[in-house]
Image (tube, helix red, strand yellow):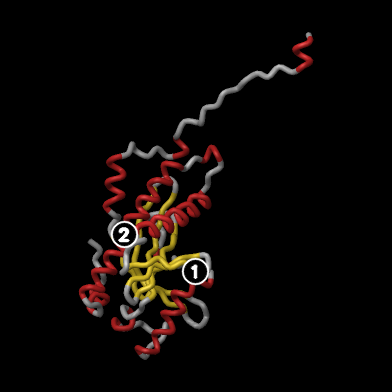
Amino acid sequence: MIDLPEGLSARLAPAEAASLRQAVAAIGEEFAGVYSANVHDHRESRGDNSQLFGMKVWVHGHFRLQQRFDDDTEILVVNANGSYTVKVGPFSLGVYKLGDFLDDDIHSAFPDASPTKRGYGERNRAQLPLFECSPASPLPPAARFGLNDLIVGHFGNPRDGLVKWYLGAFVVDEHGRASWAWIQRLELPEERIELTRSRPPVVPFDAREADSFEVRVRRTSASQSE
């Protein structure tokens, strides 16, 4: 069960809150599975690196969410500008990798500076005049939880898989500086636990045996004539 912040739940009808919880929970479950699968497939011996790992998490996560919500009329995956958004009720959920490790600071981590990703913070800024406040001032609860562009931010790496994830909303001021309006860390999804139980323990890639290969001696024409 996903626990939404009290200020957010208070503004939603029960059906809206249930749909948002369902969407966020599904995202967590799918990305837990994606991280687990890609950890098992990661091989430094063939040139795999953290950049490739992050790209595979993004591509496979996008694919699995499309499959998950394909027949859902309440939760939609909308593709645009080389990215995607999960739409549920009044909310747009951006799903982004914000870091690699458990001790990475969420308060200094935001989606990168691409127009699509920063658009979440800019659209939230455009909402703030409705609450008579600006990003530079401490946001009152009504404004903080009144924002509709949310981020599901995940952290992970090829050794440990998914290590933590968050739900939150950020704003960008007129100078391009980002800050979290609110952020909530979520429990690791249950699917990650089940995958860990059903599969063999993950061996770190730097401790795995080197890939075996066969060496064959090829005789040249010169050696054959001797």
Instruction: Farthest residue to the top: give it.
Output: 226
Instruction: Identify which residue is drawn at 53% across, 44% down.
Output: 48
Residue 184: percent from left, percent from top: 31, 67
Q: Mark 1 points at which residue?
A: 80
Instruction: Identify which residue is drawn at 52% across, 50% down.
Output: 52
Q: Is mark 1 on a helix, strand or loop?
A: strand
Image disc number at residue 42: none
Instruction: Farthest residue to the bottom: give it.
Output: 132
Task: State which quarter of the image contains the N terminus.
Answer: bottom left
Instruction: Farthest residue to the left: give it.
Output: 14
* Label 2 packing within 10 angstroms: few (<14), some (14-19), many (20+): some
- Above or below, 142 relative to 45: below
Instruction: Identify which residue is drawn at 45% across, 34% down.
Output: 208
Count of residue discs: 2
- Above or below, 162 relative to 106: above
Residue 209: percent from left, percent from top: 47, 31
Instruction: Identify which residue is drawn at 46% across, 79% down.
Output: 122
Residue 124: percent from left, percent from top: 41, 79
Amino acid at dot 1: Ala
* Label 1 packing within 10 angstroms: few (<14), some (14-19), many (20+): few
Task: State which quarter of the image contains the C terminus.
Answer: top right
Q: Quadrant of residue 18?
A: bottom left
- Above or below, 127 relative to 64: below
Q: How far apart are marks 2 and 1 (CA)?
A: 21 Å
Residue 153: percent from left, percent from top: 39, 63
Amino acid at dot 2: Ala
Q: Mark 2 points at which residue?
A: 26
Q: Is mark 2 on a helix, strand or loop?
A: helix
In the rendered structure, which disc, 2 or 1, sits on the residue that comes first in sequence?
2
